[in-house]
Amino acid sequence: MRRLVLLVCVLLVAGLATAAGVRAWRQAAAQTPDWIGQDVNGMHYEVLLPDRYDAARRYPVVLYLHQLAMGDYREGLRKQVNGWFNTPAFRSRHPSIVVVPMLDQTKDPGARWINFGGKREGHAGEDNAIAALQQVMARYSIDAERIYVTGNSMGGMGTWQMLLDYNVHTGGKGHIFAAGMPLAGAQRTADPAVAAQALRQVPIWAIHGAKDNEVSLDWDRAMARLMSPSPMFRYTEVPDTGHDVWDGYYSRAEVWDWLFSNSGGG
């Protein structure tokens, strides 16, 4: 009899635990829906819609550009960006559409030809990322005055390039981005003085680790010096931090508060 009572108790506890686990899983699934996979020009990209997306509303858009080789490791990249964009805190504070292009760099592990721009060679990655963004803009309800670009390392380089090419004021190829946030980035082809003149009206927050041994700080420091009179430009050089400055900064609410506070309408 005791064994029967014990077995019933164990099964009851297990059932309650299972039911609680299912409820927790369902709640988590409701709060953090899956990324939506898409393709354009042979490039895969993923989209995260706001919680309870409503087509009657207009949402800001963030184009995120990843670092070297992460496009070849989709699960790792998704896990990384989930920690920044797919959290209850971010999604409740900044309901937005997040677009993540994933470059296949298996045949170009050094990103010489396959990158988001900002380097001496290669432009298809930039073109395809913009094509992905334009698809999203056409398919979903977006706020055209609040479209942003950010990225880290190789993606930080691409962010600088896209700000030159597609900022809403002086973009050489089009007018899309209201603001940008390059982390551990640089631009390896443009003249800093010419770039500073072109970007003087564009809200930019550049962030770089002071001990970065992979991407030189020279570009960001030059832009900070040249753009110091502009209230639109911020530069944060983080002491005692190396290349992966994004680990600390993408998790900070204040960087996203700043980015989303900007509008192409002024």
Image (cartoon, rainbow, N blue to C red):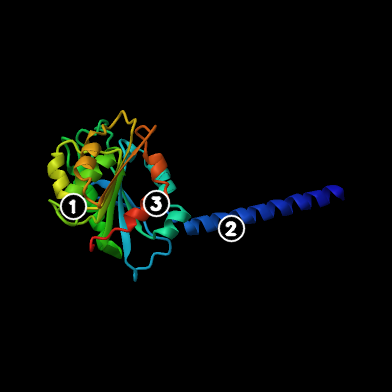
CA gap between label 3 and label 1 equals 25 Å
Tell me if label 2 and label 3 are in contact, CB under 8 Å. no
Residue in view at x 29 percent, y 63 percent: 142
The amino acid type found where label 3 is placed reads Glu
The image shows residue 195, relative to residue 174, as above or below, that is above
The amino acid type found where label 1 is placed reads Tyr
Nearest the eye: 62 or 194: 194
- Whichever of callouts 3 and 1 sits on the residue coming sooner in the sequence is 1
Nearest the eye: 236 or 120: 236
CA gap between label 2 and label 3 equals 33 Å
| Disc sitting over residue 166 in the figure | 1
Q: Which of marks 2 and 1 is in front?
A: 1
Nearest the eye: 91 or 232: 232
Q: Name the residue under label 3.
A: 254
Residue in view at x 27 percent, y 60 percent: 263
- Whichever of callouts 2 and 3 sits on the residue coming sooner in the sequence is 2
